[in-house]
Image (cartoon, rainbow, N blue to C red):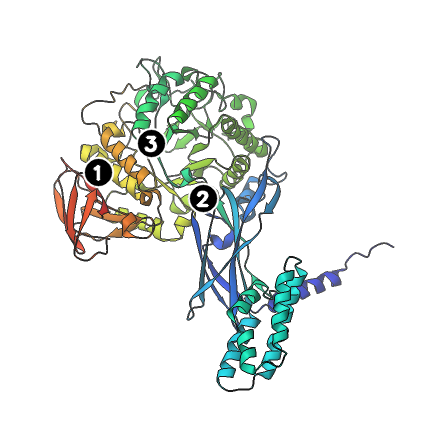
Amino acid sequence: MKERRPSAVDRRQSTVNARRSDLSRRVVIDEVRPVIDGGRFPIKRTPGEFVDVTVVLFADGHDVVAAVLRDHVVVQALRPAKGLRPAEGLRPAEATTSSAVQPDLNAGATATTGKGWRETPLTLVNPGTDEWTGRFDVSEIGWHEYSIVGWVDRFATWRRDVRIKFEAGIDVSLELLEGELLIREAAARADQLGTGAADAAWLSARADALSDANPTDRRVSLAAADDVAALMDVYADRSVATESPVYRVRVDRERARTGAWYEMFPRSAGPDPARSATFREAASRLSAIADMGFDVVYLPPIHPIGRTFRKGRNNALQAAPGDPGSPWAIGSSEGGHMAVEPGLGTLEDFAAFREAAERLNLEVALDLAWQCSPDHPWVREHPDWFRHRPDGTIKYAENPPKKYQDIYPLDFENDDWPALWQALLDVTLSWVERGVRIFRVDNPHTKTLGFWAWLIGEVQAREPRVIFLSEAFTRPRVMEYLAKAGFTQSYTYFTWRNSKDELTDYFAGLAQTGAYEYLRPNLFANTPDILHDYLQRGGRPAFRARLLLAATLGANYGIYSGFELCENRSVKPGSEEYADSEKYQYRHWDWDRPGHMKELVARVNAIRHREAALQHDRTLRFHETDNPQIIAFSKSAGGDDAHRIFVVVSLDPFYMQHGFVRSPFDLPGEYRVRDLLADDTVYRWRGDWNYVRFDPEVRQGHVLKLEF
């Protein structure tokens, strides 16, 4: 007989029944934190970190409510490296909708399962506001899930009430029968599990004890004992429990949370200032970078550079013979984004450079810049991937009145966009296959936002250890959205925050609001594009101040090469552009020239590696000072003074500054603090307020730790 298909009436009735079932659930779960945009995006952690969950949870009436926090690891079968394309029929505009931009838990998986839910009882911390808390730790890189389950605990309610009635002298005969039934129901649930046979027998025996001739006080004592309550919790009746939506945690490796970056142009790291260094020659520079304590060496684009409209020295519109051009003008007859600039060598030479870095415990980060020079092979092979003017010519990049005729932006909304997206994924995966696990992404805010969620999800589905740093000096909401959509780390406005109020307001907002759940800041003290006026005017003291601030305010920070030499020459007054910028020419540096501060950089990075407090962002707290030119803040690890780092910095690079700072150490009487920047310096402090003094020629700040 042919099976009858459900009619419209059947479907409506099924919906009504499901709705009634939802309405009959008495526990209300509300205001779950941390949750990003109602669960649309995941929170972020690294292995070993905790997720502290708070929730408002209650029910009608006066029954006892119970709740648990559930979490598990999502197990994914990784996708193969090739063969996947954006969903057919999905337009780029649709890729910015909520369903497309959030990385799918199933992205990159042929199968997605859980390792089994782990449950942690929630604790009611504030009966007046019905606020509950719980925590779980994350251990594995990849995806974790968590949710809240709450129910009315009939046995706990009975246990509470029978004690009250018995102690008041009320007859509890019927209540004891009710308790017996509740225990027998739990025994039946244990028996159904198969593995709970022993527990079922034990509960049944306790239920029998409620129906025999024991005195009432004995029966009450037996039924309400803690061992009974504990086993009843295990087999609680959750048939009408309320469950929250399932929320997600993206767990990245530790380098996502903390690291020191050093940006270098490998072409400037050779013996001959008249030509590009090769990768093998540039590898000789790596030991000096490692000696300064950096974790990541970041390279601007390393691909062939176009010749059409090639820029000359100091961004001149005409290149002279021998000028190498800008590495961001990617593509020539020698190849595109998968190739290496011939002056740097070959792919084998890049592999040798990466292996040399890894022997020094340095990771190599590459730049992803989705743009092309007019000479890129894609311009000839896929002209429809670019935007065109009415006369048919391809539009070059502009930031009016500036023109960048050596760069063609890609059109992420062209009719052949799935092929473009796939080509960019193929490029990224090709470098992943060559051992690259960190990418700094150039101007991601100028590309379709949904593209990044797709690309990052696809890459991490194949290699979960890959880290993406967003270089998006853009509006705050756009920067935040990129972080939500998948970027592991984000550039910040640090380079333009130089006063005490600017620094305090900005970083307190990052550390003490919900932003820390998804946005990991990376504080670059300078970049090839940004030489701030503060550094131009302030000289070496300004560089010391910005180093201390970047390296201690941020668990992730970076400098661009030349910072350790206090290079502060701009191309012209009022410009943030470097004079003789490496973006347009080879630079031959004297790394030992007078005035360098390599030892200070090495000391600061050594402190960062040693002190766990500086490897996190969310514990940042600012402290009072009586001088607006002095900023003070602390970070902690372990929640006690023994693991707290207190940083005090003078923001004035010109004049001596002094005053009193409020100590974060809650200690009576006299105590000692050691300056980690100079281990032989110990100060005797007393009480809350203590005196500090800074001479720009001698010292710009303290990194203090309590001495026991």
Q: Is residue 423 above or below residue 494?
A: above
Residue of label 3: 294
Query: Is residue 597 in view?
Result: yes
**Callout count:** 3
For badge 3, the amino acid type reads Phe
Q: Nearer the viewer, residue 219 or 234?
A: 219
Residue of label 1: 677
Q: Are marks 1 and 3 in contact (CB under 8 Å)?
A: no
Mark 1 or mark 2: name the one nearer the start of the chain.
2
Q: Residues within 10 Å of mark 3 (few under 14, many from 20)?
A: many
For badge 2, the amino acid type reads Pro
Q: Residue at x 51, y 79 (%)?
A: 163
Mark 1 or mark 3: name the one nearer the start of the chain.
3
- Give the left or right position of residue 19, taking residue 698 as reference: right
**Dot 1 lies on which element?**
loop
> Marks 1 and 3, how far apart in space?
17 Å
Q: Residue at x 60, y 30 (%)?
A: 82
Provide residue 80's location: percent of width, then percent of height. Answer: 60, 32
Q: Residues within 10 Å of mark 1 (few under 14, many from 20)?
A: some
Mark 3 or mark 2: name the one nearer the start of the chain.
2
**Dot 3 lies on which element?**
loop
Q: Nearer the viewer, residue 567 or 296?
A: 296
Provide residue 643's location: percent of width, then percent of height. Answer: 29, 48
Mark sitting on residue 47: 2
> Marks 1 and 2, how far apart in space?
30 Å
